[in-house]
Image (cartoon, rainbow, N blue to C red):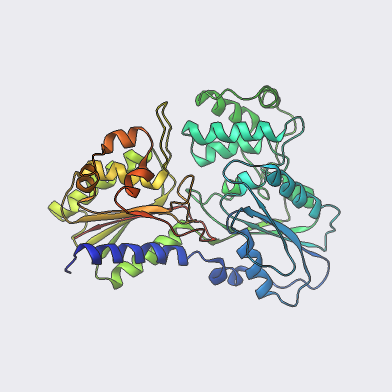
Amino acid sequence: MSLNDARARAVLRRLFDTAVAAADPRRVLAAHLPAKPTGGRCVVVGGGKSAAVMAAALEDAWPDVSLEGTVVVPYGHAVPTRRIEVIEASHPVPDSNSERGARRLLERVQGLQARDLVIALMSGGASALLAAPAPGLTLSDKQAMNRALLACGANIGEMNTIRKHLSAIKGGRLAAAAAPARIITLAISDVPGDDPAVIGSGPTVPDRTTFADARALVERYGITPPPAVAARLRQDGDETPKPGSLPRSDFHLIATPMMALQAAAAQSRDSGLTPLILGDALEGEAREVGTVHAGIARSIRTHGEPVRAPAVLLSGGETTVTLGTNATGSGGRNTTFLLGLALALDGAAGIWGIAGDTDGIDGMGDVAGAMLTPDTLARVRAKGLDPRVMLASHDSHGFFDAVGDAIRIGPTLTNVNDFRAILIA
């Protein structure tokens, strides 16, 4: 297979687009719906970056069912719906609409009966978007903790353990509020391992974690919580619903990171490449994960192991970026990964890469990810910039913007976490 720069870029972009399309709720949701209800109310609640498009897909699939309810999405992620209310709120740090939306969901499920059906539509982003503070806490307390969690280097499961114990809706509390109605959750996974209790902090899922777990994590990451948060975490009452306590709540995944990787692998074969899926749940510091990917890519290029070129390494999951004191730039997990990859490859010939968040937003701002080419470092250095300084200052968005290789696509209205593809000629 002959690969020049233009073709390599086109192949990688096609793989990214294929992965995103595989998780499009308009394509996949209808196949996972239960039998249509024949009596009682059908209440739809939800949160996350995909919640509005999931609600629209549900309305299209069930035009003859009387639907009511509310979903909460980030600003700019709303789509037209006919019967289901859509509230826009802030992500990743909640705002007053996040609290209003969460309270609205709790109101929607009050007073339901055993014959009623609740359909919960959950996807990545729901943790910030559904911010109903637990008793004794305020929205400002939640905002302060969210900022601390985003900067401390904790993984998504650890962050959500803390969030659940500061919330009136997370960790199964929404399902408890809806009892005795039947609850069916349809979810798009954006978390390593596809744990239902972690996706959106599991509003409809029993919670295995405890206040003691949350306290230990706060201590481990050196977080100084607001006084009201510290006081709440010191108590062990008001625990989240535990396994076995929500007998009428069922959970179904309609799209996952592995599904997206498998779709990209099939597209790779069609493009004449040998795909190697490294995993859908890779975690760790983004720059270090980039270094590991560089080592595997070099081995394929030099030794033909673990697969022969032309090949593509595919991986997903959610890395972390721990911000240092000199983090003055703008960046995200995926561009940080690629900058780490670039430094480790050091201009190695015949290796290209793409990494992006499948929701269309890498960290903060409007960058979804970026493209890496064999001459990226040389082109950046030719502009008088120092890649290592830019990595240390968390300026990976600026790094790729400097050479026009940052990718901006806008919200995709789905989210199966990060997608990474490394092409070796």
Quadrant placement of the N terminus: bottom left
Q: Quadrant of residue 113?
A: bottom right
- Whether residue 319 sits left or right of residue 45 in the image: it is left
What residue lies at 70% left-to-right and 72% top-to-bottom? 35
What residue lies at 35% left-to-right and 66% top-to-bottom? 14
Residue 278 visible in the shown view: no
Q: Quadrant of residue 333?
A: top left
- Whether residue 21 sits left or right of residue 96 in the image: it is left
Q: 84 or 319: nearer the eye?
A: 84
What residue lies at 68% left-to-right and 41% top-to-bottom? 242
Disc tally is 0
Residue farthest bottom in this picture: 64
Residue 147 place in picture, x, y as percent: 56, 34
What residue lies at 69% left-to-right and 38% top-to-bottom? 167
Eyeballing the image, is 412 above or below 406?
below
Eyeballing the image, is 160 above or below 215?
below
Eyeballing the image, is 308 above or below 418?
below
- Whether residue 66 sits left or right of residue 49 in the image: it is right
Residue farthest front in this picture: 383
Residue 276 place in picture, x, y as percent: 29, 58
Residue 193 place in picture, x, y as percent: 48, 49
Residue 279 place in picture, x, y as percent: 37, 52
Residue 324 visible in the shown view: yes
